[in-house]
Each structure stands twice: as structure tokens, then as C-alpha cells.
Amino acid sequence: MRIRGAFAGIFVALAFAATLVGACGVLLESALRAHAPVERYGAAAAVVTGPHEVEQWMKQLGSEPERQSRPLTERAPVPVAAAAKLRAVPGVRDVVADVSFPVLLGSGQAVTGHGWESAPLRPYRLAAGHAPQAPDEVVLSKASGVRPGGTVQVQVNGAPRPFRVAGLVAEGPGAAFFSTGTAASLYGRPGHADALAVIADGEVEDRALRAAAPGLTVATGAARGDAEDRAVAAARPDIVEIAGSLGGIAIMTALVVVGGLIVLSVRDRARELALLRAVGATPWQVRARIVREIARIGAPAALAGGVLSLRLGAAMHAAMVRRGVLPDGFGLSLSPLPALAGFAVTLLAAVAAAFLASLRVSRIRPVRALGETAAESARLPRWRVVTGVGFLVLGVNALGFSATATGPAASASVGGLVMSLIVATALLGPLVARAGNRVLGRAARAVSPVAGRLAQHSAGAAALRAGSIITPVALAVAFAGVQLFAQSTVAHATRVQAEAGDRADRIIVSAGPGLPRDVADAARRVPGVTAVTPVKRTSVIMSVKELGDRNLRSLNARGVGPDAAATLDPDVSSGRLADLRGGATVALSRDVASGLHVGSEARLWLGDGTRIDARVVAVYDRGLGFGDVLLPRDLVAAHSSVPLDDHVLVRGNADLGAVTAAYAGTRVVSPGDFQAGLSQEVKLQGFISYIVVAAIAGFILIGVVTTLALATAARRREFALLRLVGATRRQVLRMLRLEAAIVLGTGVAAGTLIAAVTLLVFATAVTGLPLPSVPPLTGAAILGGVAGTGAAAIMLPARALLRRRTSPNLT
């Protein structure tokens, strides 16, 4: 019965490990295969666009340079003249130059504007009226609620203008069509388009299209969706990194939790295995038996977990899409590969853990076999001590590096720090247990002299068992604390930096796609306004130094107007923000400057892939609150798919009602309300941390419960002996409660110490805060949840064992 219980616990742990690893594989596969859905370009055989990514050879420390790439977030314009060569390719019937630009109707509805010549690409079909012909005509959707011949106000990148509704299309409400000349004028880039859609009569060779459009990107099949919507392609590398990181953490966690569980089960059967050695079994026969037994359990457990991983991965994907962490159209890919990966990784980990656990018991000499198992050895194997100290040294080194590093390098080293300390705790667990026993054992004896002495003696005599219990407890506390509180610290630091650097009295925001440039000019003319700064968000690609290597990274950037120094304060440490004007100038946060100084040149790629060598005019400290890169607003707008501003900062207590009345979808908010909205965005971006904690911490808690229940069930002979020498059931349970307080308290303390050290380094090095942001209720819930679950896993099996009749046979 005992063996079956141990095997059942191992089965459950292995199944959940395979489920978790496979679910990470589902996210990874979905990211690798994700493409935006093909909608408007459904009738096109191919779509020719500008570059979709930036590629560069990056020099790595101690190795050869490697080619790195990052996706572009903006659409690079394509010269319309390139259509002539594409039309000459055999099989091509026509090439349509497609332009797209945001449109805000007078009703407040946001749609996308196009030229009518691109309508057949979806295709859109007229349901009433006629195609737009005059410069002031527009075709809308039937769902817009207007009729042919009516008039609507249309706002693009200026004040609203009246347009006559020439016709209606039956398809969805997301498009507005203009005549070719009007669309080109509203698009604002003469001689260019967003894409060239190739219409074919038959098969067209991709090679021929690429030869006809050198330097451009030719997308066919599912990749046509990325030419239409860049959001999915831009999110793909980040999701690949997150899924890979999450998978690595899941594998490491599975090794620690499952490995400790298998070690406990083998130790519980030490007498049985020792008897095999005593009757002549060779060490390899004992090892083979243990490995075969674990493999027989692990294979069906890993298979079941692999199948369940597909459902868990789909649920994680759905949650991220629902909360906006993943962009619309980021599809789910399900195949047997993640399930097979979860099966293989889990089974391999189980077999490796079983083999390592069998080494000591199989090496015992037959004559000493039974004697060796009568009492637990107080000494740790030398290899375990040396390896544990090695990981502890790695953790201390990572601690020192993180304390002096900044930005991405500090974030990367913090991850290594927490994993090194957790592995060191797992290897040196018995030593940690003895240290905790000396401290908490005294407290237990003060609470109850008799039961406390028994609890301290029991915890000290079985340090190996206590070490196996401490490890998953410390892992649960450290992992949950670091994942949750690192995100809350970033959110708090972002809010603090943004509030400290905000000098605006009013902020104009938009309920639509953005603010026309005229809004800032109109606000500047209002009496009482002393400074106006239009702000446009974007992303740039830049080489950033991380842990000695240079890596290509996508960085949050903002284009700001010339009055930026009067409306925002990013805490400039060198240079002047007022010099951020004109052509290629840039201000960098301290986290990404990485050796650059005022006057030097920074090579970076704008949102549409245009490379610039910008002169650094300032270095500032508030990178979380204002982004890592500040650029002139006109430079950013000229290389953005949408030239509209995100918001406008206004200095001066003036009445801006005339401005908001003149432009559709605009309103004025206070800095406090604006910062509350930004804080909500940061929290939404951290939603994935909660998914990670829910998945992995749930698995760790299952491991904690299984490990503690197995360790308690293995002590039936000890409980029987205590009852035979006169201890009452109540006294044994009191002893167990105090022993649980000692062991679980040591594990919680170890996990809290790891989390505290890691978060302190993270707060000071990454966010610049003196202390991390730790919500008291969340911290108490983590500590109470882990300790309470562990106590229940110890006391419930113990109560069940003590209800049985005590047998005088203790063999």
C-alpha cells in the first residue's frame, strides 16, 4: 500500500510536469507559426511590401558573430513605380497599389481609409450607390448607418471635412473608400503605397517576383496577413522568448520537484533494496530495477500529461488573447509536437532522477546493507556539497553583477541569480534544514518542552528527509514572490517616474486612432498656454549591451515636440533635452546608453526600418516612465504608418474647449487620470506573469503536497514506536505540528530570503527604487498558502496513520 501511494504521487507529479512543459511548447509553436489572418488581401496571389525586419551581425563575447533579427512595427512604404516590373512577370494580370490610413467619422467610429481600386482585393462589393469618383466622395459600409447621398464628417490628419456618401458596401464596418487621387492625398506619401498586391491569372513563381522587386519583401500564402497587419509579426519574437524562458523554468522546476520526490521514494524503500544487495544482487541490478520501475510509471504519466498539455496550452493562449496580451489574429497552433516534447522531457528527467537516486543505495556493500538503512546518514556526498557550493558562488557572483549592472543586463542576471540560489538550496537542503532546526527548534522547545524536544530531535535526525521537504517549499515561495513582485515593482517604478517627470497641466488625448498634428498647433494658439508638446509612441531597434554581449533589441521610443523640456522631465543626467530637435538627434535612457555619451553617434533603426546615425544630445534616468529612446516628433511621424500623435502635453491652465470642439474624438484629461490609464496598460502587460505563476506555482504546490505526504507516510514505523513506548496520539500530533513548523518555517524562510535578495537587486538595479513594491496581502497569501498547504499535507496523512492499531512488529 505504501509503495502504491508513492508511485501514485510520482505519477501525478510527472503528469503535471509533462502538462506544463507541453503547454509551453504549445505557446512556442503558436508563436513560430503565427501570422495575422488574411482578410483584405485574400484575392491577391502575393503581396509586395517593404522590409519586415532588421538583420545585423552581432559580435558575441568569446564566440563568433551571429546574425540577429528583430521585426519592424511600422509599414515601410513601397514605391508605386515598382509595380511596372511586377506586371511584366509571367502570370501576373495586374498589380494594385494599396494605401491605408486611419479615418475618424463624425459619429466617433474609427475606420481605415483606402483607395477604391483596392476594394476587389477582399473583395468588397457595392450594395448601393456607386464607386467614389469626385474628390469629396466616400464609400462606407452599410453597418455605418448612413445612406447614399448623405454627408458625413471625415477626419484624417487635420480638421474634419464633409464628404458625400457615394455608395455602400455590404461587408464589415471597418473600411472607407475614396477616389484614387483623394486616397493618395490623404495618405500623405506621394508616389508610395503600403503594399503592392499582385493579381495573377495562374501560377506565379515567387523567385520571379523577388527578382522583379529587389530589396522588397514578397509574401505569399499565410504570410500575406503579416503584410496587412504588423502586430502579430511584431509580437512573435517576444512570445518566442517568453515561451522558451517559461519552458526552461518549467523543466528546471520539474527536475527539482520530481527529482526530490523520486529520491524520497527510493529512500523509503531503502530496506527492501538493501535486502536485495544482501542476498547477492549486483549494484547494476538494483539500479536497473529502480530505473525500470520509474520508467513504467513515468511513461503513462508523461503520455497523459502530454495529451493534457494541449488543452492547458490552448487555455493559456485564450487567456492572453482575451486580456489583450496577444494581438488579435495571433492564432493557436496545435500539433502532436508539444505533447511529444513534454513526454520526452519528462520521461528523460524521471529516468535520470531515478538513476541518480539509486547510486548510493546500490553502492552499499552487501554485509553492511541492512545496517546502512537502519539510520539515516548525517553526511552529504562530497559531490553534492561541492556542486551546491558552486551554484551558491554563481548566485553570489550574479548578485554582485546585478547590483552594478543596469537595464536589460541586470534583468538577465537576476534570472540567473534566483535559479542559482534555488538549485543551491536543493543541493544543500540538509545543511539548511540543520541550520533552521537549531534556530526554530529552540522556539519549539520554548512552546512545549517535551513535544518541542521530540520535534527538534526528529527534524535533526532526518536532515536528508527535511532537506527534500524544504526544497519545494522554498521553490514555491521564491518563484511566486519573484514573478509577482518583480512585475509590481516595475509597475510602481513606472508610475513613480512618470508622475515625477510630468510637468504638464493638461493632456489632450484621443478616443480614436490618434490626434491630427493640427491639434498641437491649435492648443499652442490658446491664450494662457505656455508650452505644447505632441507625443507619438513608436519602437526603434538598437544594439544594446547585455552581460558583455551586444544584442539587437526592440525598444520603446517616443517622438516629442520641441517644447519637451518644458512639459516633461526624464531626469537628464547629461546633455540637454532642448537640443532634441531638427534632424537625427536622440536622447537615451541610462539603461540602454551602454557606453554612449553626449556628442557620440547612436546607430538605430526607426519603426519602418530606416537606419539613422543619430547624435546623442542627452542621457536620462527615467527610462521606465518615458521610454528608452526619445526622438524628434517630426522624424518619428515621417517613418510611421500612422502620422497621428498619441497625446499632447499642455503647460498652462487655459481653457482648451475650443480645441476639443474642433476635432472629433478629442478630450482633455488631468495628469492624474492620464497616469492611471498608463498604469493600467503596464498591469495588462504583466498579465503573463500571473499566467506563469498560476501554471508553475500550481505544479510546485502539487509537488509540495505529494512530497510531504510521501515523507509523512514513510514514518509509520516511527509513529508506531512512539505509541508503543507510551506516547498518546495527541502527543504525537503535537510533536508533528511543531516539527512541521520547524521544517516548513525553514523552507519558507529560505524561499523568502531568496526572493528578498533577488527583488532588492532587481529594484535597485533595474527600476532605481530603494525597495521592491510588495503588496502586503499578496505576500501574506503566498506565505500562508504555501505553509498552510504544507501543514495539511503533513498532518492529514499523519492522522490517518495514527488511527490504525499499533502493531508490535516494527520490522
Image: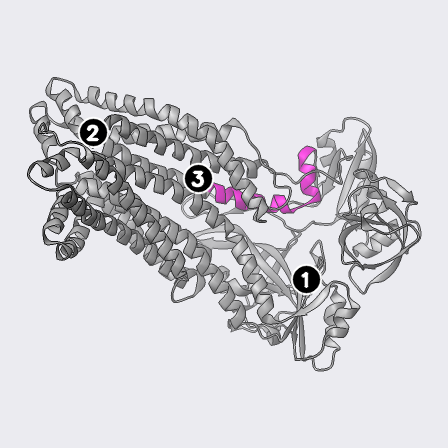
Give the answer, above or below, for where 41 lies relative to 525.
above
Dot 1 or dot 3: first in sequence order is 3
User: Is residue 525 something one can see in this rendering?
Assistant: yes
Q: Is residue 679 left or right of residue 91?
A: left
- Give the residue at x 20% y 35%: 803
Q: Residue furthest top?
A: 280
Q: Which residue is mark 2?
A: 359
The answer for how far apart the CA atoms under marks 1 and 2 are is 66 Å
Residue at 67% over, 37% down: 223
Per the rendering, the mark at residue 635 is 1
Three-letter code for the amino acid on which mark 2 is drawn: Leu
Q: Nearer the viewer, residue 790 or 13?
A: 790
From the image, tell me which residue sits under label 3: 247
Report x, y in % for residue 653. Answer: 66, 80
Instruction: Please identify the quadrant where the N terminus is shown.
Output: top left
Looking at the rendering, the stretch of residues picked out in magenta corresponds to 221-244
Q: Could you tell me if the residues under marks 1 and 2 are in contact, i.e. CB atoms within 8 Å?
A: no
Label 1 CA crowd tier, 10 Å (few <14, some 14–19, many 20+) = some
Q: Is residue 201 left or right of residue 264?
A: right
Alpha-carbon distance for marks 1 and 3? 40 Å
Q: Which image quarter holds the C terminus?
A: top left
Furthest residue in direction bottom, as rendered: 528
For label 1, the SS is helix
Q: In the displayed structure, would residue 479 be above or below residue 808?
A: below
Using the image as rendered, state which of residue 571 and residue 367 is in the foreground. 367
Per the image, label 3 sits on a secondary structure element best described as: helix
Q: Position of residue 168 (x, y in %)?
A: 87, 46
